[in-house]
Amino acid sequence: MTSLNPIFAVVLILACASNILVRAQNCGCDTSLCCSKWGYCGSTDDYCGDGCKEGPCKTPVTPTPTMPSGVSVPDVVTDAFFNGIIDQSDASCAGRNFYTRSVFLDALSSYPQFGTVGTSDDSKREIAAFFAHVTHETGHFCYIEEIDKSGDYCDENNTQWPCNPNKEYYGRGPIQLSWNFNYGPAGQSIGFDGLNAPETVANDPLIAFKTAFWYWMDNVHSKIISGQGFGSTIRAINSIECNGGNTPAVNARIKYFTEYCSQLGVATGDNLSC
């Protein structure tokens, strides 16, 4: 279950296949190219379509709501809600002594827009979506690290965040942070050495939850808040599952999201699948 997060594999394949692909630095693409949601430059739909940040984008950028919703995340993510997830994991799971609601709330204080902007329904759907993905990625908070650690997860073409040859960048934490180009900037933002000490994510629960929020706020938050639907969050978390790539995994994520929306008293909205 925790091996389902090679979310940038598609980008890596494209990097090898295209002779016009250039790694963008702060979306510094040529004016004729699009800066994709992953920060790469190109001219195809992979770059100019969904999530395009700059350039001749084909899909208009949907404004992200910023007005406070009035929702209190601690009031929504109660002990009963959190424990209702983790209690479904086996008593022997390492995550049961690692993931706690109190640490989740401590990490949350660094990301005040999570679950608090847009309408009340937007906020509740965002909370439900976050926990749906976390439940799937960690097996109800069972796993701290990816089960299958055989993947390379090192983009050697990325010179901005070079791999330490003695370290591995497989999935760790609630969202299963993966790849050097995620560990590097996550560490810089949060305050740990992501490239030289990626194991910190599996050793420090506060850092672990912060990496989940960091990835979420950078790549997922705007999609669910702007009404693009839960399916867009699946694509942002693990795009290779979409379009028939792993239909059972997609269905599992949708199942959890539907359950949590029901618990929080909010409709799921449209576009559930990717």
Image: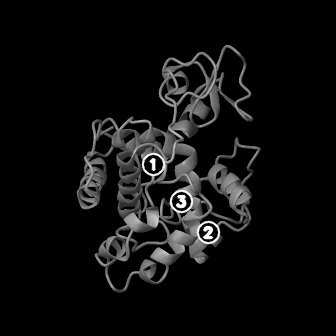
Q: Are marks 3 and 1 in contact (CB under 8 Å)?
A: no
Q: Residue 4, image x and y in percent? A: 41, 55
Q: Residue at x 73, y 49 (%)?
A: 161
Q: Which residue is mark 3?
A: 212
Between 201 and 272, the one nearer to me in the picture:
272
* Residue placed under numbered mark 1 in the picture: 69
Q: Position of residue 20 (x, y in %)?
A: 66, 22
Q: Which is nearer the N-term, disc 3 or disc 1?
A: 1
Nearer-the-camera pick, 89 or 123 = 123
How dense is the environment of label 3, judged by Cα within 10 Å: few (below 14), some, or many (20 and up)?
Answer: many
- The reply, left or right, for residue 102 in relation to residue 77 is right
Nearer to us: label 3 or label 1: 1
Q: Amino acid at mark 1?
A: Ser
Mark 2 near mark 1, Cβ–Cβ under 8 Å? no
Residue 107 seen in render: yes
User: In the image, 222: left or right of 232?
Assistant: right
Mark 2 to mark 1 CA distance (whole Å): 27 Å
Residue found 39% across the figure and 45% down from its top: 122
11 relative to 248 in the view: left or right: right
Q: Is residue 239 visible?
A: no
Dividing the picture into quadrants, the one containing residue 241 is: top left
Tag 3: residue type? Ala
Label 2 to label 3: alpha-carbon separation: 9 Å
Q: Position of residue 11 (x, y in %)?
A: 55, 37
Foreground tag (2 vs 1): 1
User: Is label 2 in a helix, a strand or a loop?
Assistant: helix
Q: Is residue 204 above or below residue 212?
A: below
Q: Which mark is residue 207?
A: 2
